[in-house]
Image (spheres, helix red, strand yellow):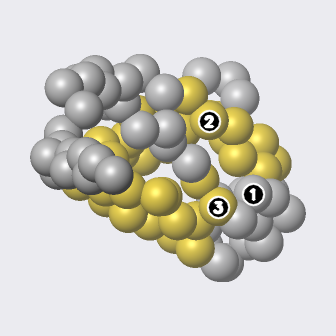
Amino acid sequence: MYEVALTPTLATGEVNSEKATFNVFPNPVNKGNILYFNRKQDYELYDMSGKLIGKEKNALTITTTSLSTGVYLVKTSEGHLKRIIVK
């Protein structure tokens, strides 16, 4: 009878260079509620005509009280683009 002892591995040697996905929730959101990000992000908020509505650095939320109902685009500093709907 033989016993084989395996040495513990602390890492796989693989490096994940892929950035985590960026999500906005809840979407659609009711006017006056808060939109949340899944991680801190620099963003710019645009209306559908392309007009810059607002921007913030290192943010986790967007307050929708000053937004009209409609469709908006959130563009992050990493190049992610998300469409949000304010009801």
Q: What residue type is labelled 1?
A: Asn
Q: Mark 1 points at which residue?
A: 27
Give the residue at x 77% y 42%: 71
Q: In this view, does 32 lie to the left or right of 85?
A: left
Q: Name the residue under label 3.
A: 25
If you read the primary sequence from the N terminus, does the residue marked by circle 2 or circle 1 appear first? 1
Residue 69 falls in image quadrant: bottom right
Q: Distance between the residues labelled 2 and 1?
A: 10 Å
Q: How far apart are marks 1 and 3 (CA)?
A: 5 Å
Q: Which of 27 and 4 is in front in this view?
A: 4
- Expressed as whole percent of the image width and height from the top left, the position of residue 39 reads 37, 56
Q: Quadrant of the C terminus?
A: bottom right
Q: In this view, does 51 lie to the left or right of 19?
A: right
Give the residue at x 75% y 57%: 27
Q: Which amino acid does label 2 sit on?
A: Lys
Give the residue at x 42% y 46%: 54
Q: Name the residue under label 2.
A: 82
Q: Nearer the viewer, residue 32 or 80?
A: 80
- Expressed as whole percent of the image width and height from the top left, the position of residue 30 reads 78, 72
Residue 68 falls in image quadrant: bottom right
Q: Are marks 1 and 3 in contact (CB under 8 Å)?
A: yes
